[in-house]
Image (cartoon, rainbow, N blue to C red):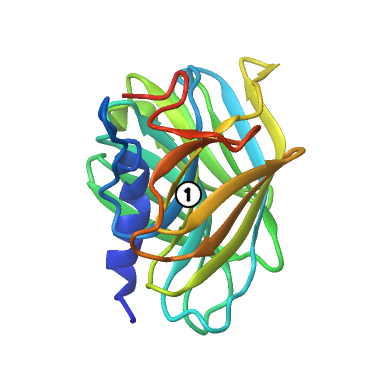
Amino acid sequence: MRMRMPLVLAAIATFGLLCVASSPAKVTTISPDGEATVNQVHDFSGDFDLIYKATLKPEPTNTSWSMLSIALLNIARDSGITVGIYAGPKLAIAGFTSTNGGAARFSFRRAGPCVPSCTIELRGDAATVRAFIGGRVVASWTRWSYNMPQPYVQLNAEVTAIGDTIDATLVQQRAMINGKAIPFPICGFTTQGVEPTAVGDALHFRGKRTPGARVTYLSLVTGATGDSCPALPR
């Protein structure tokens, strides 16, 4: 299955706004793709800096798009800023930035190659958020342009077509708020066959998009699953 690039990237940009929907009885998702997410639920309204070495393994038999990203989102899930890397059929892996919920509603910008890996970074203060790829500034936004009074961060991996696979890694280089290190995440979310795991400072996202696969939160420490994780947005 092939999908037009803008539609796929729209799904990429909005997934973080959708995937953590849950009820007391059962966790659910309305994402159309196979995805895994790890949440960083802290106060990102002031100074912060998140840097990860991002690797997205080429999958020659995939027929559609896949991506790996850092997203700054509002807890109300109506706006977001994303930096990451993506791959498409017969295309080299490249960086991108995207936004949702600002004056332009949705935007996407390609940001050069990322082979075989590169660092991706979101850095912010009370007024501005900037995105870096490979240590180079690729985009900058004013916070007032986006409705994010309670921002948090999601680390996402996504694969679009049924049967396509993803093997992606984010290795934490820096994760700080107001100059102080924040804890390494301990909780993830999986849907349609893409699973998150953690080893040391690395987050791995692997799997094949499989409709009907489990939809659940899971501990990155013990592997235990459930309908929620402590301190996740509701």
In the rendered image, which quarter contains the N terminus? bottom left
Q: Secondary structure at mark 1?
A: strand
Q: Nearer the viewer, residue 179 or 55?
A: 55
Q: Nearer the viewer, residue 134 or 38?
A: 38
Residue 154 seen anywhere in this rendered image of the structure: yes
- Where residue 159 appears, as percent x and y from the top left, is 44, 64
**Residue visible at 38% across and 33% down in the picture:** 73
Give the left or right position of residue 182, taking residue 215 as reference.
Answer: right
Quarter-wise, where is residue 216 in the image? Answer: top left
- Where residue 223 appears, as percent x and y from the top left, is 60, 38
Give the left or right position of residue 73, taking residue 207 as reference.
Answer: left
Residue linked to disc 1: 36
**Residue visible at 41% across and 76% down in the picture:** 64
**Residue visible at 29% across and 75% down in the picture:** 4
Q: Nearer the viewer, residue 182 or 217?
A: 217
- Where residue 140 appears, as percent x and y from the top left, is 46, 40
In the rendered image, which quarter contains the C terminus? top left
Residue 137 seen anywhere in this rendered image of the structure: no
Q: Nearer the viewer, residue 17 or 115?
A: 17
